[in-house]
Image: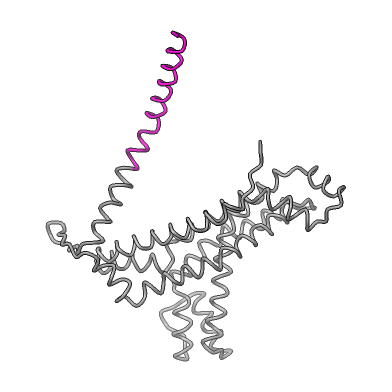
Amino acid sequence: MKSRIRRLSYQGRRRRQGMLFVLPLMIGLLLFGVIPLIRALVFSFCELKVTADGYTLSFVGGSNYYRIFAVDPNYRRYLLEWLKNMALNLPITIIFSFFVASLLNTRFVGRTAARMILFLPIIFSSGIVQSLMQNDLMSSVLSSSSSGGVVGERQGLATAFVSLMNQIQLNNRLVQFVVDAVNRVSEITNMAAVPIIIFLAGLQTISPSVFEAAHVEGATPWESFWKISLPIVSPQILVCLVYCIINSATDVSSRVIRTLHDAMFDKLQMGEGTAMAFSYMLLSMLFLVLVYRVVSRFVFYQDR
């Protein structure tokens, strides 16, 4: 009986030590996460005016949400564009990442060099893509093509691209299609960097003897893929989907985030900005939960 009391007291001490270990994290999450989130939720139902003494709040109910969805012509369209891009980019990114990881997992001469050649452009291209988005390449192309000349303020790659399009006299629709295609390829390539690593790690956990046994039993490569490779890496597929959704939702170059940033910090419309932020957060969470619930039904977990 005494040994049991001592064992329970020892377990209690370990639990207390664990709670003390995570206590700083919980305090930081409360101070810098939960409390600001609650205050932002209050701001979304109020009209905030910045004064010399600080700010004043006046309750307006759901007027901010009504304005961003019914009055603002851009925010709702940007949300729908984000959902459409996610629905299109997610499966393409997963398929592309798994295909590249499968190629890198095969044995061939120069495999290490091929991995370096593949990942270096992905790493270095992120800064270039961000600068292109900040320069608003699409606006430069469309405005310059419609006016018949190159905008003087735009320099660098955007100006050169617009000049080339004007010289070969392409119409706006074709220019927009080309730029959209280039932007989509760059988005998928940048988003696929981490999933490729995750898929490659998952494929390397599969023992070659499993494929050898399947080959002895008469399984074709296609059957080995569907019945061995795909089920084993299905947990990695779920992880990559969650990562891609979060990565896209938190992309600071997206139109939705730029719109709410402009509303809050340029126009000082804090109420509408926080309403945009909360509606965008809820939509992202709903989309994430929906994808997780659907895909998790098909995930296969091996018994260890």
| Residue that appears at 39% across and 33% down | 22
Give the percent coordinates (x, y) of residue 264: 28, 64
Picture coordinates of residue 99 (x, y %)? 69, 59
Residue 250 seen from this side: no
Instruction: Answer whether residue 138 is magenta in the image.
Output: no
41 w.r.t. 17: above or below: below
Task: Give the magenta range.
Answer: 1-29
Residue drawn at x 35%, y 43% as measured from the top left: 29
Residue at the outermost front position: 1
At horizontal 44% and vertical 74% (from top left) the residue drawn is 136
Question: Where in the figure is residue 36, as x and y percent of width and height?
Answer: 28, 50
Pick the quarter of the image with the N terminus. top left
Q: Quadrant of residue 274?
A: bottom left
Write down the quadrant of residue 79 in the picture: bottom left
Image x and y of residue 134, in percent: 43, 69
What predominant SS class does the magenta segment belong to? helix
